[in-house]
Amino acid sequence: MLTSFFSKSKPINYIVVGLYMLTLYAIAHYRIGFELETLPILLFIVGAVLYIAPMLILHFIVQRNDLTNKGTYTILLYAFLTGILPEALTNISILLANFLVMLGFQNVLHLRNGKQIKAKVFNASMYIGLASLSFFWSIGFVVVAYIAISYFEPKNYRNWIIPMIGLVMVYLFANCFTLLLYDSFFSFQGYSDPISFSFESYLAKDQLFSAGVLSICMLFFLTIYLLKFSRKPANTKPILRLIIAYLIIAIAIAVISSQNNTSELFFAATPLAIIGATYLEMQYHKFAKEINIWVFILIPFTVLLF
């Protein structure tokens, strides 16, 4: 049974989820057409790595910080939540930004152990700054770094300056790169994106379905998560609040982004997968849980194939 299979954490679980994600990724690219030429094939391979690698980072995060039980429900939900967003699966800029943001978030959570605080804050802000070069509004995740500082070492004023230093360093490196290759300074106008509150493109049938499923999951999972929050160990609550902050920022980015084709919702998959694992780990009828898992597995195929 799938319930028993995903309640364990074995190498075969990661392989199965990875192959599932690769299948969804391949179908998404097949929908828009795929050219058998060197550059498209290379971009396809790079995009596949950028899509699947965060799944492993996510599993490391939840296991290292004891956020879930020792199963693989989190990465299964991550595969489901990203699979219902086919526009993102074919957008290498979003995949790259998401990968870098997750690396930054991993460094933020490492502040919990109280060691090398400044280095981890700097690394996190650098990763987020690099992500913003791929997708500008991912720069908003630097707020998570500031929230983490307020939890773990707020009294050292230097910590509050470091994220800005990290972002400035990325901007300077970008200038060096453009000066070297194009003999011009890095344009802030080309770097930043406008704010847009237009959601007309969501009225398309496939995008409306994707946004609707994600919204329902968000409301359902978050409600259960907040009800269970008081029962969590006190030492994990700052981490859990950071995950909620991550989700709120991801939603804010989706609201103000000018893309408005559901790919901007991709960043919500990481925190929502962690939050949703709380539901799958609850003790309720095994048959109902089995049905839930099958629904999660099959829904992305309905989005991609119909």
Image (cartoon, grey):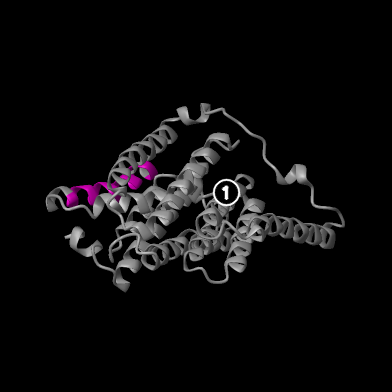
**Residue at (47% x, 42% y) in the render:** 248
Above or below, 26 relative to 217: below
Name the image quarter holding residue 10: bottom left
Q: Secondary structure at mark 1?
A: helix
Instruction: Tell me which corner region of the image, top left, top right, bottom left or bottom right, holds residue 182.
Output: bottom right
Q: Which x, y percent locates residue 32?
A: 50, 46
User: Count the marks: how many?
Assistant: 1
Out of 115 and 38, give the one closest to the viewer: 115
Percent position of residue 120, x then y: 58, 66
Q: Quadrant of residue 26?
A: bottom left
- Mark 1, residues whose alpha carbon is within 10 Å: few (<14), some, or many (≥20)? some
Q: Position of residue 16 (x, y in %)?
A: 32, 65
In the image, residue 198 lies in the stretch drawn in magenta:
no
Given residues 88 and 56, the one toward you in this image is 56
Q: Provide residue 232's location: percent of width, then percent of height.
A: 30, 55
Q: Main secondary structure of the magenta part?
A: helix
Residue most toward the front?
Answer: 155
Q: Is residue 237 left or right of residue 72?
A: right
| Residue that label 1 marks | 143
Name the amino acid, label 1: Val
Instruction: Name the residue: 34% across, 42% down.
Output: 222
Q: Is residue 261 above or below residue 191?
A: above
Q: Does the magenta run of residues contain 295?
A: yes
Identify the image quadrant of the C terminus: top left
Side of 188 where 295 appears, left or right: left
Q: Is residue 253 left or right of residue 61?
A: right
Residue plotted at (77% across, 45% down): 188
The quadrant in which the N terminus is found is bottom left
Q: Which residues are magenta?
A: 289-304
Residue sitting nearer the eye, 27 or 224: 224
